[in-house]
Image: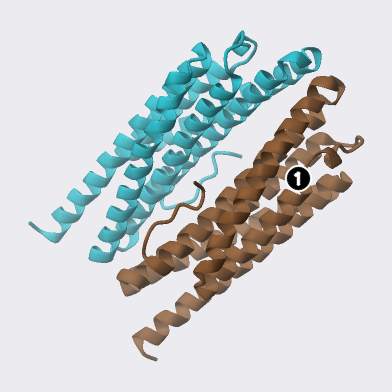
Chain colours: A brown, B cyan
């Protein structure tokens, strides 16, 4: 097998590991949100336990990428691609961490009447998952349009996050007896806003990969 | 100049850039806290502006490290060292981000009677800075004892953070008129707890570098 073919195969394997990581993270986000919505501590605990698999996958990817760099000493585009894989895997790992944070907030909220309906958190979660799917597709298909769409969706999440902050703090000043739940929902609001930020970073890394030029879709 | 001497010189340059980044981050944390304490929006804005220099330094370090990997194709310990530099610079960058987050919280709190004295936030900030200095020293001097001390200090920060959370939420349920400030202080509490986590990651990367074995000082 030629050196080139070999390198491409290794890169494909890295990409399939990234895809697996992203899929596990989508599952973690969905589950964490289900736990929050139904106040199901069992599901929350499963999200926390499941994070080890995602962390291990990231370590796998890192080691594979480092081995590939050491072996092939790639330059220009090939090097950019491997660095891109490293960056994207670390961003996905952070998205999965936010799912864990949401699960932990769920456990802290415990069993009480949910105030989720006064927030936009569910919409924010849905848009974030759409963003992650688009960012991944953009990376796999080297499609810059999808990367730009991710940037647009992030603005929506920011908007919803700002509104949710206002609603939760207004409710809080009138219902101090709900402090615990409301503070945790304020944290979840922040986690989802940050999730969207990190997914936007994936799109930016992808755009850099495609165009060899740095983008800032956050601004 | 021999290849080996050359490599060592490049590594030294990377280390001096890491030191510079860490020093800038300590300044950012100190300043952000001064801004919070004195409710000085001007200083808060300076922290936010100053973050670009830290981000640029991280990019510098990344590019230098990648160039060095491409040029020398280092193996075993040399490779571990460069990967360590990349990890540590990304953790320092996150510490600096938390300084920015504290500065932003300061701006949101605005001009009102400070409730900082009901928290342990100042102690947490002081311990975090001590941790960062120790983690850096551990890395530069390859001293595993300092790395372990960082892990111990993180437990103190965790303890203070738990107590601060309780105090702030208890105060909040009795003073709903202070919701805005108290919610922002709850965020700052979380930022400092996360700052300590990331500094602990630096110590863990350093321990891995020294011993070639993975540590978890967080548990």
Q: Nearer the viewer, residue A40 or A213?
A: A213
Crowd tier of the residue under label 1, counting other residues whose Cα lies within 10 Å: few below 14, some 14–19, many 20 or above = many
Question: Secondary structure beneath disc 1?
Answer: helix
Can residue A211 be spotted in the picture? yes
Look at the picture and state if A39 lies above or below B169: below
Q: Does A66 appear above or below B12?
A: below
Q: Please tell me which residue is depicted at 48% across the width and 58% down the height of the picture.
A: A204
Chain bearing tag 1 is A
Q: From the viewer's perspective, is residue A102 above or below residue B151?
A: below
Whether residue B107 sits left or right of residue A176 in the image: it is left
The x, y position of residue B218, in whole percent, is 57, 39
The one of B183 and A165 positioned closer to us in this rendering? A165
Q: Position of residue B162 (x, y in %)?
A: 68, 25
Residue at point 42% right, 20% down? B43
Please tell me in which quadrant of the rendered image residue B21 appears: top left
Q: Which residue is mark 1?
A: A121
Q: Nearer the viewer, residue A123 or A23?
A: A123
Compared to A6, does B94 lie above or below? above
Quarter of the picture holding the N terminus of chain A: bottom left
Q: Which residue sits at x=83%, y=38%? A: A118
Residue B64 image offset from top left, x and y in percent: 27, 53
């Amino acid at each position: 097998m030629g050196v080139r073919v070999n390198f491409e195969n290794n890169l494909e394997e890295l990409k399939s590991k990234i895809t697996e990581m992203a899929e596990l993270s989508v599952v973690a986000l969905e589950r964490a949100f289900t736990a929050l919505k139904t106040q199901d501590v069992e599901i929350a605990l499963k999200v926390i336990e499941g994070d080890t698999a995602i962390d291990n996958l990231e370590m796998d990817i890192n080691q594979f990428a480092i081995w590939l760099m050491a072996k092939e000493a790639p330059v220009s585009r090939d090097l950019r691609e491997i660095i891109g894989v490293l960056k994207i895997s670390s961003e996905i790992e952070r998205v999965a961490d936010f799912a864990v944070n949401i699960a932990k907030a769920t456990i802290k909220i415990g069993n009480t009447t949910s105030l989720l309906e006064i927030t936009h958190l569910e919409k924010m979660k849905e848009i974030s998952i759409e963003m992650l799917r688009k960012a991944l597709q953009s990376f796999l298909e080297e499609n810059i349009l999808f990367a730009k769409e991710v940037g647009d969706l992030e603005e929506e999440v920011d908007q919803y996050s700002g509104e949710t902050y206002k609603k939760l703090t207004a409710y809080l000043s009138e219902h101090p007896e709900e402090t615990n739940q409301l503070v945790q929902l304020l944290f979840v609001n922040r986690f989802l806003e940050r999730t969207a930020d990190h997914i936007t970073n994936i799109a930016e890394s992808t755009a850099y990969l495609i165009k060899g030029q740095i983008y800032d879709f956050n601004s």
